[in-house]
Image (spheres, grey):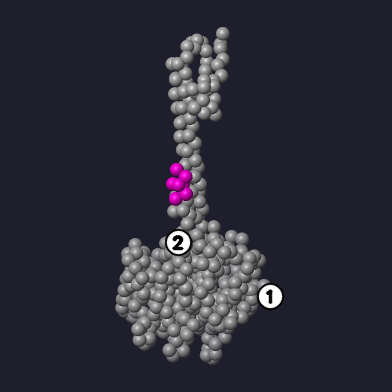
Amino acid sequence: MNAIIIFLCFIFVIHPISCQLIQERYDATSIIKDDMLYVLGGQDQNDKPISEILSLNITTSLNVDSPPWSRSLKAPPLAFELSGAFHGGANNDSIYVICGLMNDPASGANINNEQTLLEYDTQKDVWTRTAMASAPQLNGRVKFALLSDNKGMVYLHGGYNYYNYTYLGDTYSFDISSITWTPLPSPQTPIIAADFASVLLNDGRLVIIGGYEQPENGTLVHRPISQLDMFNTIDKTWTRQTVSQPKEMSDHRRYHTSTLLPNGDIVIIGGIDVVPNVVILETTKNQWRIPVVSGIEPPLLNQHCAELVENRYIFIMFGKRADGQNSNKLFILDTENYSWITSPKNKVLLSTVALVFSILLFGTSVSLYKRRKNRLANVTIQAENVSMSENVDSHTNIMVYPNEESHKIKDRKFRIFSNK
């Protein structure tokens, strides 16, 4: 029984962890599908596109010092960077990748991805390449907003063309089921250019935060962090809103990430030459707030990835440090108490621990029950043997103590009490 318990503990608690070296990268694309977090493509230290897909099971126990990343056995048909990704396909099992820069992995030659839609089937681990009709300047489009409403519609806005340095202020919707692009109204001036962060609120508003804009004279300027541009995906209108901010907070921000929390707050992390590292936009109060964050703060990152896990933890991955070096690290921000942590309180891990304790308790109970049952059986046998061998009055009670060893029966070491 003890061996079985130990074996079960080993099976349920100990998980093999891959210690393979993960390449540093920035400008990668991240997305969560079911229980898996995927990081797609990116640029290496030599600014070359990466043809690789990484995955991390977010339901298993993990530590930021050695996250168990796995590499897909099937590499994408194209290497890509600065691309966007969204869900779709049969049973919503696919991840689609569009825009950005795409290269041939073998030759390194640039690929015109104007009409290219890459599809990754997460169940079959298979990549396919589909041609789209009437695509809106996708080839070389980088630093844009691409957001899904999780109802089959994706929204694309802004960015710039990497090959001719043209800044784009257009807006489109993409119907995943029909693979159809539809032009939408765009802000006239200034052009909301690039390097911003964006989220899609639950009420259908697409919010643009930070980055650059291009006024009529053509000179790029920083967009104030206190200035929010919003596109209403319901009535297809653009509005601009000003929100208050603390004076200790940088006036502008670029190459940062934005994460929408269930309560409507938007958490901004990182950027270039900004303070502090983490700021919060309270959408219900139209104001910025600087949280007090405990724990060991990670280095300031830019061009990194950020994903919300279990509606509580923000996973910050890869990116570029302030010294210009790429990162392959994982950092976790707990938004429940705003602290940097090394390991999340994983629900599956907690349930596994509870299961192990239940197994231990059950095993111990069974073992004690069997042991007690065997002792009582021995006592009964001993009592019957004594009754048969001794001429004892029928009114006499025989009490045999459990701690009396069986070999003492022959010595008749019993305590006999008479009721007379």
Residue 285 point in image, percent of width and height: 61, 65
What amino acid is at disc 1?
Lys
Secondary structure beneath label 2: loop
User: Is there a contact, CB below 8 Å, between mark 2 and mark 1?
Assistant: no
Q: Is residue 327 left or right of residue 134?
A: right
Residue 112 point in image, percent of width and height: 35, 85
Mark 2 is surrounded, within 10 Å at the Cα level, by few (under 14), some (14 to 19) or many (20 or more) other residues, namely few
Residue 182 inside the magenta-drawn segment: no
Who is closer to the viewer here, 63 or 347? 63
Q: Quadrant of residue 134?
A: bottom left
Residue 99 higher or lower than 406, as above or below: below
Residue 30 point in image, percent of width and height: 46, 71
Q: CA distance from mark 2 to mark 1?
A: 48 Å
Residue reaching furthest front?
A: 411
Q: Earlier in the sequence, mark 2 or mark 1?
A: 2
What amino acid is at disc 2?
Pro
Q: Residue sitting at 38 percent across and 86 percent down?
A: 108
Q: Is residue 213 left or right of residue 174?
A: right
Secondary structure beneath label 1: loop
Q: Which residues are magenta?
A: 1-7
Q: Which mark is residue 79?
A: none
Residue 163 higher or lower than 209, as above or below: below
Q: Which mark is residue 16?
A: 2
> Magenta region, mostly helix, strand or loop?
helix
Q: Residue sitting at 64 percent across and 69 percent down?
A: 290
Mark 1 is surrounded, within 10 Å at the Cα level, by few (under 14), some (14 to 19) or many (20 or more) other residues, namely few
Query: Which residue carries the number 1 mark?
Result: 247
